[in-house]
Amino acid sequence: MNHRINRRKFTYSSLQGAAALAIGSAAPHGWMHSLAASLNTQPTNQERVLVVIQLSGGNDGLNTVVPYSNDLYYKTRPKLAIPKGEVLKLNTDIGLHPSLRGVADLIENKQFCVLQGIGYPNPNRSHFESMDIWHSCQRKEARGTEGWLGRYFSQSSQFDNPEATDSLGLHLGSEQLPLALVARGVQTPSLSSIDQLRWKGKPEGNMASKEEMEPQRKTAVTSENSLLDFVSASTSAAMHASERLDKALASPDNAGDFPDSHLGEKLKVVSRLLLAGLKTRVYYVTLDGFDTHANQLLAHAGLMRQWSEALSAFHKRLNSAGLQDRIMVLTFSEFGRRVAENASQGTDHGAAAPAFLSGPKLERSWIGSQPSLSDLDDGDLKHHTDFRRLYATLIEDWLGTPSKQILASEYTKLDGLGLKT
């Protein structure tokens, strides 16, 4: 049998094999090789992880964290307000949507914190522009092509030693790679499921075996064709990584009981990767559907339940594995909704809204006051805490990296979370 493969066949076969991988940058970097190299190494307690849950569409903060003691809330939302008797009360003023029973349990366990009044000056009510502001920390006129987490990856000292760590970031979902994860010279994998990390069976047709591929790969990476260099290296690395993952995932799935939902499946995969020993520092997932202009009550209740049940299952699994002190989850949305309901029993695009942290033991269950319902910005809640202060706190106190360069300015960190060790 002739084991030699020509350049055209190699490129075509390699592209077929690598087609399952979506990479967030064209610049070559061996994330799959370093993934394979470290699967047998269990993480230490000092390796902290950030999981980001993006609620796309503009989550209604007022019906998530309910100001049930405020008469203006019920006056401006005669059909959409959550009845006082159904609110999961946190104190004498605010409570949670009744679908957030799992979140309430996390608060009871001191593993959840509500951050009120989060936003930015001169809010933009476009989904795309506001989300880009959250992702890049800059407005359009000053914005480049990099996101805040991508800049963190670039700045991290781990990035300079790809042999010692997995890819620093991973996006899980069918959506386009979020801008937050993008940076020049950084590859962030974007995977629709864990199966995309696993090589699909034995090579067929023109696809060479791993043993056949290796000498060709070594030759190809010295060529002048950068695409072939990248594909050959990525293909070989993917095969090595697949073997490691097949071994790591060969045992029964012990990731715990997760709800049968889109977010539940994503967080289940994240938990399996964490339990398999990956050293990725940031995982990014999205839950869509929050643009509730009409018939909001049932739709929002379902989304709140999906988020709460998936998040609760995720933390239960981490707690049982003893990983709870290593994993922080940030949940955010690009903006909130208007205070008053509209004529279609929904709410329109707003401004300030709560963000949420969950995971390790937190010193406080909520930070910041509920924005005024009478002092509004064109019908919307006014923010009192810039979201970049939250980012600065996570970058410095949780991930242990200076934040000024990442955020393009210096922001005062939030007090009272107790994240710094």
Image (cartoon, grey):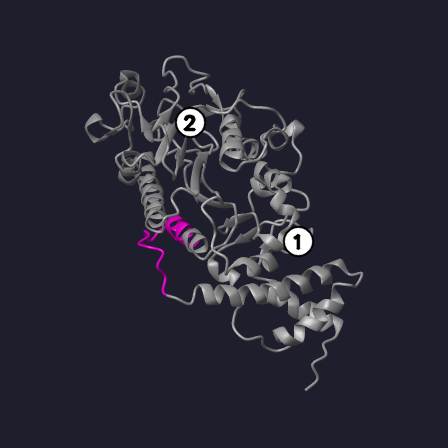
Label 1 sits on what residue type?
His
Circle 2: residue type = Ala
Number of other residues with Cα within 10 Å of mark 2, as a class: few under 14, some 14 to 19, many 20 or more: many
Q: Quadrant of residue 301?
A: top left
Residue 59 tag number: none
Would you name the residue on which mark 1 appears? Answer: 29
Residue 147 is situated, as x and y percent measured from the top left of the image, at 60, 37
Give the numbered dot on residue 353.
Answer: 2
Residue depicted at 53% across the width and 27% down the height: 388
Q: In the depicted view, which residue is nearer to us: 236 or 16?
A: 236
**Residue 305 sits above or below residue 80 on the image:** below
Indicate left or right for 387 with 254 as reference: right
User: Looking at the picture, how far across and down is residue 247, in whole percent?
Assistant: 47, 67
Range of magenta residues: 252-269
Query: Which residue is the extreme one toward the left?
Result: 85
Q: Earlier in the sequence, mark 2 or mark 1?
A: 1
- Identified at 64% across, 75% down, the residue is 211
Residue 201 located within the stretch drawn in magenta: no
Q: For numbered disc 1, what is the local secondary structure?
A: loop
- Residue 309 image position (x, y, % from top left): 31, 45
